[in-house]
Each structure stands twice: as C-alpha cells, then as structure tokens.
Amino acid sequence: MARQFSSCSSSSATFSTSSFRNETHLYTKFTIVQTRTYSSTWVSQVRSRIYSGKHFVLKSSNGYPVNAVSLQDGLAEKPLSRESSDPLLMGSSTPSESGETESTLSITVIGASGDLARKKIFPALFALFYEDCLPENFTVFGYARTKMTDEELRNMISQTLTCRIDKRENCDDKMDQFLKRCFYHPGQYDSEENFSELDCKLKAKEENKLSNRLFYLSIPPNIFVDVVRCASQRASSKNGWTRVIVEKPFGRDSESSGELTRCLKQYLIEDQIFRIDHYLGKELVENLSVLRFSNLVFEPLWSRNYIRNVQFIFSEDFGTEGRGGYFDHYGIIRDIMQNHLLQILALFAMETPVSLDAEDIRNEKVKVLRSMKPLQLEDVVVGQYKGHNKSGKTYPGYIDDPTVPQDSLTPTFAAAALFINNARWDGVPFLMKAGKALHTRCAEIRVQFRHVPGNLYKRNFGTDLDKATNELVLRVQPDEAIYLKINNKVPGLGMRLDRSDLNLLFRARYPREVPDAYERLLLDAIEGERRLFIRSDELDAAWTLFTPLLKELEEKKIAPELYPYGSRGPVGAHYLAARHNVRWGDLTEDS
C-alpha cells in the first residue's frame, strides 16, 4: 500500500489558507518599502568584503559574488519588523537602522545521521569551506533522532571528508578548522521543544549578530511538514533570512505533490523553499545553456529544422542493492525521469530567457513543460531486471531483494517518447531512457541532426545514412565531455570517409577537479540564487505530464518486460525508438 502524505491540518498547524493569503498580501506590500532602506547598507558591506583582499573574488553559479552571505537574495525575504512574531514567514526582519551589522550563517542538516548527509552534504560543505566560499562567521549543526555528541558527529563526518586535488597542502588544518564549527543536537522531528533547544544553541553561536539560517531536510518526505512547522515556530531567524532545502521526492503524483506544497506554504513563502534536484548542479547540465546561448554555431541549429531527435539517457550498472524497499515505493519513472531527465529536457528546449535571472529562466522552463502533452501508455516501455549468470558470477534479480515484494511490478527501466507542441520543436521526438542493472553507467544528452539534403557523398556511406548523421553528445557522467560527431576523409589516395569526434574531454582540458553538484547547489541556496531550484508551478507542470501514465500503469497492473542484469535493457525500447525513426545513440559501435 503506497504511503500517503499526512494532511497538514494537524492540531499543531493552526493557520488557515485564507489567513496565509492575507499575510502574504501584506508581506508583499511591506517588502517594497523596506528594500529601499536596506539595500545601500547591504551593498556597501558586500563591496567592502569583495575588495578587502582577504577573500577570493568568488562567484555563484549565476555570476554574483559569494563572499557575502547574500547579495541578491532576497531583500524580499526581510519584510517585517523585529517585533513581528508571525511564524508563517519563518523569521525575516531587517537589520537595525544603526548601520552595518555583522552577519552569521547557521546551516542545520536535519537527518544528519543518514547516508545522504554523511556522504554528500557534509563533504560538500567542507569543500565550500576549503575553497573559501563560506562566509567568515558560520556554523554547521546536525539534527537527528540518533543520540550523539558533538565529538561523535565530527568523527562520523571526518571519515567522508576529502580535499581538493590541487590544494592538498593545508588539508589537515582545514579539516580541523571545519570540524570545530560542527555541532550536534539530538531531537524528534515533530518536537517543538527540541527545536527550541536547537534555537538556543544556534543563538549561542550567533552571538547577537545578524543571523541567517539554512535548514537542509535530508529526511523522508512524510516528515517534511512536521520539521518545517517546528523550525518555523521555534528555530527560525528573528533578524535575518531563513531558507529550507527540500530533497526529492516531491510527492508521488500531482495530488500528493500539491498537498505537500500547500502544507509547506502554511509556514513558508515560495522564495524560502529550495527544492533541490542535484542533477541541475552537474557541470555539464550547467554548461548546456552556455553551449547553446554563447556559441553562434549552435543556436541557429537548435530547432526542428536541423535537429531530428534528442535523447536523454541515464543508466546504472548496479541494481537496487540495499534500497529495494524505498525504490519499490517510487520506481524508475518517479525516481529519475519525472525529475532529473525532465528538468534537463526543459533546460535544453526552452526559449532564450530575457536574462539569467532565476525567474526568467524558470519561466521559460515552465512554458516548455506546459507545451508538452501528457505521456500515453503507447509511448512508454517499462522493464524490470531479472537474475543473470555471467562469467561464473550470479547477479540477483530485482525481486530477489528481500525488501521487495515477490509480485512487485515496479519498473526498474523505462523508455518514453515525448513531444513539445510549439513552433520550435513540433514533430521532434524527445526520447528518455533510464534504467538500473544495465551494461554500463552513464548519463548523457544526445542531439542527432538531420541528414544532409542531397548528400554528395551518400554512396560512400552505403545505405545506412544514420552513420553519416552529425551528433552532439554531452556526457554528464562519468568523465564529463562534450563531443561532436562529424564526417571526414581518411588520409590516403582513395575517397574513404570516416566518422570522427571533435572532443572536449573536461579531464584533459581542465585538470582541476570538477566540483560536486551539491557544492554548487548549497552555495546557490546560501546566496539566494534560485535558478537551479524547482519552483512550485514547475513541479505541478512536471507531475501533470506523468501522473496519468503512472496511474494507468498501476491500475492496469502493466507487467514490465524482463531483461537480464547487465544487459542493454528490454527489447521493447528499441521498438519504441524505431517507431519514431530513431536509433538509440548509446548502442552504436562508435558511441
């Protein structure tokens, strides 16, 4: 039985929707007045830091300085006076009028004892500290139900911290400095009393400075609302900003996602919610818009006139080992396609935004999603991996996992064909493919261009014109790369053609280690840069595309096509591509 999100009309949630709307209306009006009185002071603080010589001139992913806690964030997040105690706004008032106020940043990782926090979030925070990307006054708090001391948290964190390859000389010193700023507070996720205790510890570290607080919810979605309620009422900042990073999944369908958003907005406004999809922080996904909008050679080709199809491919060479129980509740479509791949598709296909401002970019992404028709069952193939023996080794099937029901129909593989009904992309198939326990691990975007009309060298390629098609590939992982497949003449007296790559391999061109996606997204959240985070209307549009399909799969109990562990996936995926006159680019000999 699928677990549902609890209703937000609990005994502890006392705010009606109409009340929230009224508060928001007043909030918006007040913001305009306060922005004028505060901006000059803030900008002067930022400039003094940037030009002080004590810090690198570092920039967030949108090109803004980062050596201040927030430059463009959101003066809109500071509308109410210090006397206000409305928990709806989760703490947000302006600094005192006496002049400049030294600020602090407190980062609280909720669910600090979990794998995500240990393997990704704490290492990303240390990497930002190591690269001097965090403000001078910051502390990191872990919060979870597990009983633990500060020292035990530091020991746990230290096992996953690594230093940048090109800056090893001060590694041990930096680690010690970072760990001294890490603290822990045990507590229940639905206890306002425990969050009040956390608030006292935060205030002790903030020492009456302007306090900015970031909460990272590294917890299951069914307890998001309880944590946000407790944090908003007991542990939000009273004189700075408060923001909350929310990890996927954002519901299981349109209804549960909408309910989660409605519940969160009883205690937060939209600008305080940072819905994180770590794939949007990947280096090559970031490079996608740069490649298109800053190179004249590509932008004129970015339409149905020259592009034959676009493929978004995600494959893992391992199964659900250890995560079967969680995965069976969601499946590959919810876990990968509805968020990671669809977000990349929206970035790829959007029109040129007015600017690099977060709202301009997110507006264009929403337009793309709203231009797409909901997925139909005939445009989708689902699969599930089965046990397989290879080279004397036995690989278990999905239902061999003891945490997975024996009659599970949850897909571990899915392929889909989507279409965008607008002038730029009319008729161009956008193919997605995602799966576990496949033959290789990769994530890539493949753009296959149309055949050359009246190609003079057609006879040199034989009957398979696909081999003569230009293809642009952005390999997101592993070994980040951008390469363009072109046709050229093989040196010699004859006229023999070959397909070659114009290759930008990041590892060779840029030997510096590529930052992890969580580093970029955490830095942007600290800076108030929302460009790589998902807005609520964007989330609604994404679920609208997939919810009818998901319900039909579950109601009709569609059996997934079985494929061997370590194979290229179910045969049905090839038939789906062929129906749209497409050949999967990752399965060719020279892929």
Image (cartoon, rainbow, N blue to C red):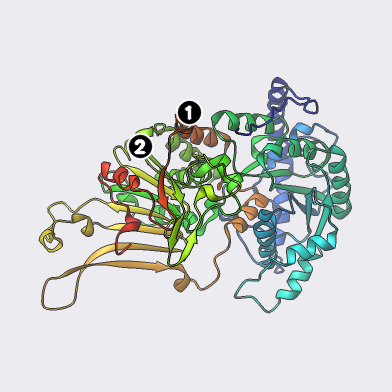
Report helix, strand or loop for mark 1. Answer: helix
Task: Give x and y (percent) for residue 20.
Answer: 71, 25
* Location of residue 553 with respect to 479 vertically, above or below: above
- Residue 262's quadrant in the figure? top right
Tag shown at residue 379 = 2
Q: Which residue is mark 1?
A: 555
Report helix, strand or loop for mark 2. Answer: helix
Task: Give x and y (percent) for residue 69.
Answer: 71, 53
- Residue 567's quadrant in the figure? bottom left
Query: Is there any visible trace of residue 71 in the rendered image?
Result: no
Tell me if mark 1 has few (under 14), some (14-19) or many (20+) residues whose alpha carbon lies within 10 angstroms of its own.
Answer: few
Q: CA gap, disc 2 to disc 1?
A: 17 Å
Asked whether, in this view, residue 250 is left or right of residue 219, the answer is left
- Residue 297's quadrant in the figure? bottom left
Type of residue at label 2?
A: Asp
Between 342 and 388, the one lying in front of the other is 388
Quadrant location, the N terminus: top right
Between 164 and 443, the one lying in front of the other is 443
Asked whether, in this view, residue 293 is left or right of residue 39, the answer is left
